[in-house]
């Protein structure tokens, strides 16, 4: 650690000696370099330690009442991360060396000391203290992430058990609610790739259910009996991400007291879901490229790679082609990820699924909140269908959870339960009465007009674009009162 990178005055130093002249010498020599506290003897030193965040303790060994080693032992009960140094004018080197070997003391300095040498020793002690603090924070963060993963896997196992009991098999694609043409196309593509080990890239706006589809692909694959490990790479600091994904060896850095497997090794034989892949740093992208190319990871501190058999499903709401042009994402990594791309539609692109999706979410959230599930009033469903969703399915879920909390028992959910301000739907063509059916008709008409415009009025091409037969398109146009020339 470079001394130039440290503000040495930010780490308080306590000097303990029974001679006032020695404490005055310290203040004169080092008062400008360090944030110094002084104490005449052990009892006074312990009181200073209780009141201040001391990082380095310099204690004279021979003091009445309490020796320097005894002061250090008591001090570390108060400040466990303290870095201790011993000053001595006597030749009791054997006991001091023993204390150093036991880890009680960083080093001892004989009197009389060289002022320049002691300044360097104090700086080294401060650097050691800062490094110890940093390593402890990293170890705590790693422990927190491992605990989060353990809890997530336990929760996932419980959810999978519930789904198997209620659906007769794994969740799979049956967990995806909706039968509209855009969603059908997504599921058809996912079915094609589910049985292979091919890398999948899920693209689309936030809140469209990318993790749900990734789980479904895993559940429908031969890997369904092994772990599905989801990780949002955009929420983990770059410092920890490498160790979290690839693991580390014991002693690879201070605080690495045991070998730890990374998430790729934990997912061996199963699938790993890398959400927000567009948020990764260039250095991490190099490691991910190696996993995809060679099937190997290199744990921190390892001397040889570890082979892993992991199916990678990545997701992003960013335009990765634009990220490549901007130099923020590797082109070769994008090619490795986009072997089988699937774009998830926004909720507006399959608004015909909103009623069924709303009913499904209502039932699921009622179980979560331990409430009996009410029903939607026709006006509430009509309002949901006509709403514009910036947050897609996630926003719809939030609206329904709010409504469940606000809706009185034994009453239907109303538009007022869903929204603070109920959106005003435009008047439907033909003077419709504002029911769910009229909202669906409005949506169908607008979608058909958009497709016809995109296809320059060619109804055959428009029908294909909409996932309909030619006859099906004509029937819908007739139902919506649209002329053949529309």
Image (cartoon, helix red, strand yellow):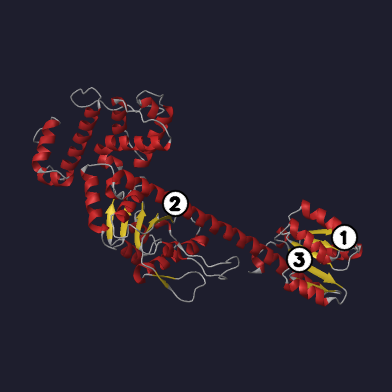
From this view, report whether residue 444 is shown above or below residue 167.
above
In this view of the protein, can residue 32 be seen by the observer?
no
Q: Nearer the viewer, residue 29 or 443?
A: 443
The residue pinned by badge 2 equals: 154
Measure how far apart labels 1 and 2 are at the Cα level. Answer: 54 Å
Question: Which element is circle 1 on?
Answer: loop
Judged left or right of residue 418, residue 444 is: left
The residue pinned by badge 3 equals: 84
First in sequence, mark 1 or 2: give its number. 1
Quadrant hosting residue 136: bottom right
Check whether the beta carbons of the residues at disc 2 and disc 3 lie within 8 A of each other: no
From this view, report whether residue 346 is shown above or below residue 145.
above
The residue pinned by badge 1 equals: 41
Question: Which element is circle 3 on?
Answer: strand
Q: Position of residue 84 (x, y in %)?
A: 76, 66
Judged left or right of residue 450, residue 387 is: right
Quadrant hosting residue 452: top left
Question: Which element is circle 2 on?
Answer: helix
Question: Residue at (81%, 74%) from the top-left corner?
Answer: 95
Image quadrant for the C terminus?
A: top left
Q: Position of residue 42 (x, y in %)?
A: 85, 59
């Amino acid at each position: 650690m470079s001394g130039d990178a440290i503000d040495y005055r930010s780490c308080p130093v306590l000097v303990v000696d029974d001679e006032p002249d020695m404490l005055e010498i310290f203040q004169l020599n080092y008062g400008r370099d360090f944030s110094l506290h002084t104490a005449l003897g052990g009892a006074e030193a312990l009181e200073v330690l209780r009141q201040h965040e001391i990082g380095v303790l310099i204690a004279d060994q021979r003091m009445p009442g309490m020796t320097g080693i005894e002061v250090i032992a008591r001090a570390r009960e108060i400040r466990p991360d303290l870095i201790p140094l011993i000053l001595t004018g006597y030749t009791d080197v054997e006991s001091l060396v023993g204390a150093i070997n036991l880890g009680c003391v960083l080093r001892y300095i004989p009197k009389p000391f060289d002022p320049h040498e002691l300044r360097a020793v104090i700086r080294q002690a401060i650097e050691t203290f800062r490094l110890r603090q940093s390593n402890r924070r990293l170890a705590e963060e790693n422990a927190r992430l491992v605990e989060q993963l353990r809890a997530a896997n336990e929760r996932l196992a419980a959810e999978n058990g519930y789904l198997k009991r209620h659906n007769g098999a794994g969740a799979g694609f049956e967990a995806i609610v909706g039968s509209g043409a855009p969603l059908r196309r997504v599921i058809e593509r996912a079915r094609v790739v589910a049985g292979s080990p091919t890398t999948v890239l899920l693209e689309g706006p936030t809140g469209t259910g990318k993790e749900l589809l990734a789980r479904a692909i895993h559940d429908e694959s031969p890997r369904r009996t092994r772990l599905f490990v989801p990780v949002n790479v955009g929420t983990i600091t770059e410092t920890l991400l490498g160790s979290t994904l690839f693991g580390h060896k014991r002693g690879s850095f201070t605080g690495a007291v045991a070998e730890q497997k990374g998430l790729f090794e934990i997912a061996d034989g199963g699938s790993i879901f890398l959400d927000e892949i567009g948020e990764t740093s260039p250095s991490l992208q190099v490691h991910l490229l190696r996993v995809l190319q060679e099937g190997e990871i290199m744990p921190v501190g390892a001397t040889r790679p570890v082979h892993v058999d992991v199916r990678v499903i990545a997701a992003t709401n960013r335009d990765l082609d634009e990220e490549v042009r901007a130099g923020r994402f590797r082109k070769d990594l994008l090619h490795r990820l986009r072997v089988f791309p699937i774009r998830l539609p926004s909720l507006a692109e399959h608004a015909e699924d909103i009623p069924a999706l709303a009913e499904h979410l209502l039932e699921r959230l009622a179980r979560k909140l331990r409430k009996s599930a009410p029903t939607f009033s026709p006006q509430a469903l009509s309002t949901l269908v006509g709403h514009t969703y910036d947050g897609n399915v996630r926003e719809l879920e939030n609206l329904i959870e709010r409504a469940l909390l606000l809706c009185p028992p034994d009453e239907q959910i109303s538009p007022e339960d869903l929204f603070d301000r109920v959106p005003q739907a435009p008047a439907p063509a033909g003077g419709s009465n504002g029911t769910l059916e009229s909202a669906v008709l409005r949506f169908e008409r607008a979608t058909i007009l958009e497709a016809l415009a995109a296809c320059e009025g060619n109804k055959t091409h428009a029908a294909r674009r909409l996932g309909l037969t030619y006859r099906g398109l004509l029937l819908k146009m007739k139902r919506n009162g649209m002329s053949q020339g529309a």
